[in-house]
Amino acid sequence: MPEVQFLGHACFRIRGRDGTIVCDPYHRSIGFDLGRPTASIVTVSHHHPDHDNSSAVRPLRDRVFVVDGPGEYEIGGVLITGVRTFHDQVKGAERGFNTVYIIHLDDLVFCHLGDLGHELTTSQLEEIGSNVDVLFVPVGGGETIGPALASNVISQIEPRFVIPMHYAMGQTNFDPPLAPIERFISEMGLKEYTAEDKFVINANALPEDEEQTRIVFLRPIHG
């Protein structure tokens, strides 16, 4: 049963039987400290300091395998597919490329959108696939999608679970500033929410109603 922890900003640690992955580790310049998490794999969606501090991640064993860019990767039983997207709505002309990662771990499918800046095209959706169990989606706007576009992208992918990320939680040096999580909550029509320390998902006990997406709020753990 994989366990998901939110390390702050857009960074998550996914621990499973076949491996441990850290997605988009950030540099302390954003306003808080990632610490020194351990993992066997790191994914980097794009090369900005708030997403590519792979050197902060310590190896669980001999080394950390860094996945950086589109393509197919298989590391110790973990299958990862990187899909080329853009960091803006003008095909990368303003902020360059972004890589969305689809991670197959312990019979489950996780999708980390990185700093996606647009709604997905038909071909990108085909590469991502129609069986995403857990979607990590930016919701704070600024240099990525905000609440309204995040809602649209969630409808495009139709995951079982959504975990929001990349919203205002004390980060500095963001211009324009990120929106607070409450704006996404309002956009999704939620009246209240409860944040958890971790999310444990069992492939053998998934919700039977595949058409209903559940939103999971995680409490960030960072220095």
Image (cartoon, grey):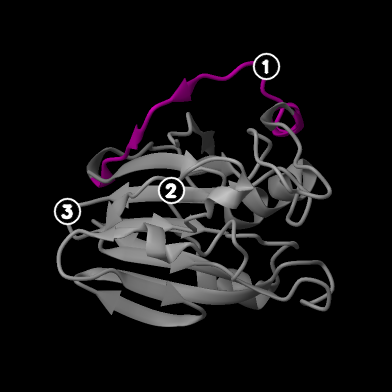
User: Mark 3 is on which residue type?
Assistant: Arg
- Mark 1 crowdedness (10 Å alpha carbons): few <14, some 14-19, many ≥20: few
Residue 56 in the image: above or below residue 100: above
Q: Which residues are magenta?
A: 183-203
Q: Secondary structure at mark 3?
A: loop
Q: Secondary structure at mark 1?
A: loop
As drawn, is 89 to the left or to the right of 102?
Answer: right
The residue drawn where x is 19% and y is 59% is 60
Q: To which quarter of the image does residue 186 belong?
A: top right
The residue drawn where x is 70% and y is 48% is 150
The residue drawn where x is 37% and y is 73% is 66
Q: Which mark is residue 71?
A: none
Dot 3 or dot 1: first in sequence order is 3
Q: To which quarter of the image does residue 55 belong?
A: bottom left
Dot 2 or dot 3: first in sequence order is 2
Dot 1 or dot 2: first in sequence order is 2
Quadrant housing the C terminus: top left
**Distance from label 2 to label 3 (Cα)?**
17 Å
Measured from the top left, where is residue 50 in percent x and y?
59, 56
Mark 1, residue position: 191
Measured from the top left, where is residue 147 in percent x and y?
75, 41
The residue drawn where x is 65% and y is 34% is 170
Mark 3, residue position: 17
User: Mark 1 is on which residue type?
Assistant: Lys
Farthest residue to the front: give it.
Answer: 29
Q: Is residue 131 magenta?
A: no
